[in-house]
Image (spheres, rainbow, N blue to C red):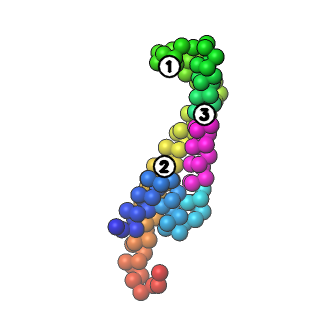
Amino acid sequence: MSRSAIAVTLSALVLPGAGHIYLKHMGRGFALAGVSLVCVWIIMARLVRLTADVWSQLESGATRPDAIEIANLVNQTSGGTDSTLVWVASWALLICWVLGMADAYRLSQLETSRKSVHPTQKK
């Protein structure tokens, strides 16, 4: 498997920035990974809060354990500034993922072209 394929696969399947770290571009890699992890944390924290709210409503008997009732409760409790933050975090995560894959591929191609131009240089 080529270095570019490994870098893109790491960025796509593990975490944005993992391909950069593999290619030894630590600054970009840790920046992408950090932003991505913060976005995942924001999304997961909201999901946990939403789940706890729905669960407490079910436990208290205020809502019947019916799929439609639960869906309505989720719709009611999922609004507000938290939902905007989750929306922004979701888009930021998607952008990090796409940019991470594209940039890892670009960097690996640059590395390959530099090695072909200067084959006598040491790695």
Residue hosting label 3: 48
Residue stretch in magenta: 32-46
Secondary element under disc 1, as helix, strand or loop, is helix
The mark nearer the N terminus, 3 or 2, is 3
Identify the image quadrant of residue 121. Answer: bottom left
Distance from disc 3 to disc 1, alpha carbons, whole Å, reads 16 Å
The mark nearer the N terminus, 3 or 1, is 3
Check whether the beta carbons of the residues at disc 3 and disc 2 lie within 8 A of each other: no
Callout in the foreground (3, 2): 3
Secondary element under disc 3, as helix, strand or loop, is helix
Residue hosting label 2: 97
Q: Is residue 77 visible?
A: no
Identify which residue is drawn at 39% across, 72% down: 113
Identify which residue is drawn at 47% across, 81% down: 123
Residue hosting label 1: 71
Q: Name the residue nearer the viewer: 14 or 95.
A: 14
Q: Name the residue nearer the viewer: 70 or 64.
A: 64
